[in-house]
Image (tube, rainbow, N blue to C red):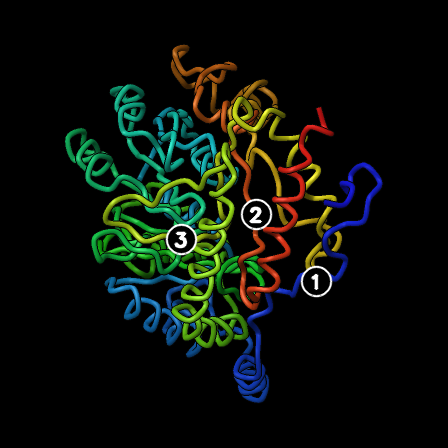
Amino acid sequence: MSRLAVLGGEPVRKKLFPAYCVIGEEEKRAVSHVLDSGILSRYLGCWHDDFYGGPEVQAFEKEWALYFGVKHAIAVNSCTSGLQCAVGATGISPGDEVIVSPYTMVASATTPLWYGGIPVFADIEKEYFCLDPESVRAQITPHTKVIIVVDIFGQPYDVEAINAIASEHNLIVIEDCAQAPGSKYRGKYAGTLGDIGVFSLNYHKHIHTGEGGVVVTNDDRLAERVRLIRNHAEAVVEDKGEIDLVNMLGGNFRLTELQAAIGREQLKKLDTLLIQRVANCEYLIEELSKLQGIRSSPVRQGATHAYYVQPFLFDEKIVGISRDVFINAVKAELPATALRELEGQQIGVGYSKPLYLLPLFQKRTAIGSHGFPFTLGSDSVSYAKGLCPVAESLYEKQLFTHEFMRPPATKSDLDDVVKAFNKVYEARHELI
């Protein structure tokens, strides 16, 4: 075995990994059609036939709803704005508490703040990394109004347990499905498992429109409130005859006709892209699990996994060195990915620092200089270190993730990843 690259040896591979680029001729034709039409957006921020957007947006919403088997799909300009619409649609008020995950993209936890809601963090599952139902139950108070679950890494949340808790306490479940489009739980698509689901069409997601998102629900009332918040609700409600004005302060969260046209073509590719991604992940599970102390997290019983990233668990007691030292050595053996060269190698440790440790929560300063909305919350709402021990342990020493499995990665590409892991594992004593 040659000398480790991190110690000055030759790396396993120098050629960039292939780009994950799923934009093709179909999208180009769709964009050209929109450009030729001259209609790049058709929204009006007032009560009018065009309040709901142009032909591409409305066709995209219908096709998305049909694919996912849901009554309503509402296109928005990002998953973040979709979450903001969804939280507002629930009718939360300043001081209301929203249970959130500490181990995710920050918007899942911060969108309640726009309405004066207080994020309350529950811990996550050791194996699946979604919200732990027992931790959720322990955080419920008379002020709790909403649970925001996250299908983290592509794994659906614990549907029966979380939904039962929500039903028991009359809470609304918002499902952040940014990382799990196409995954299922007991035959039902992730994103449709709670009361409201929110998808992402950001450029590095499974399918994308550059930026964008979709909100889905089977609830007519919630759907209409999402549409209002998406498009200047305050200017629409009077002429529409809307009498419930709670949170009817809207934004411009609208998807353009160009993005919708791309989204229609991208949706057609989701099944094929998922098949390739899952096959690649299964191959890496088989190979990397041969290394003692490294194992893939399991897939929840009854669920399928979409593998936005592929998570592995690392046991430093078995391997004999720390996760960070080991993965740093693996990174040195491999190159970056085309179109994402500035990001470095597509493998990393820890994933997300527990969100409650961010300055926003540690200083309890969000909107204005007087601590709003944290000053409205109970003193018992904690953001202290140690709050979510599972999330902290995963972040600090146990979890690593990678993105090498994205199509059009070949077996040869994956074999180079395996070679890098094997090389470092066999020579790990040199890193002590």
Q: How many marks?
A: 3
Q: Circle 1 sits in a helix, a strand or a loop, which is it?
A: loop
Task: Tell me which residue sits at (36%, 73%) in the image.
Answer: 49
Find residue 371 and report its horizontal and vertical position in percent.
54, 20
Find residue 316 and report its horizontal and vertical position in percent.
55, 25
Does the residue at mark 1 contact the one at mark 3 (Cβ under 8 Å)?
no
- Can residue 355 be seen here? The reply is no
Residue 402 bears which disc, if any? 2
Find residue 418 and report its horizontal and vertical position in percent.
59, 51
Q: CA distance from mark 3 to mark 2?
A: 16 Å
Kindly identify the amino acid type of the residue bearing the numbered disc 3. Ala
Sooner in the amino-acid sequence: mark 2 or mark 1: 1
Spot the residue most to the right: 8
Of 190 and 430, nearer the camera is 430
Of 232 and 334, nearer the camera is 334
Kindly identify the amino acid type of the residue bearing the numbered disc 1. Ala
Asked whether, in this view, residue 381 is left or right of residue 164, the answer is right
Quarter of the image holding residue 56? Answer: bottom left
Find residue 378 and report its horizontal and vertical position in percent.
38, 14
Q: CA distance from mark 1 to mark 3?
A: 24 Å
Q: Which residue is mark 3?
A: 180
Q: Which residue is mark 1?
A: 338
Quarter of the image holding residue 144? Answer: top left
Of 17 and 122, nearer the camera is 17
Q: Circle 2 sits in a helix, a strand or a loop, which is it?
A: strand
Task: Tell me which residue sits at (61%, 52%) in the image.
Answer: 417
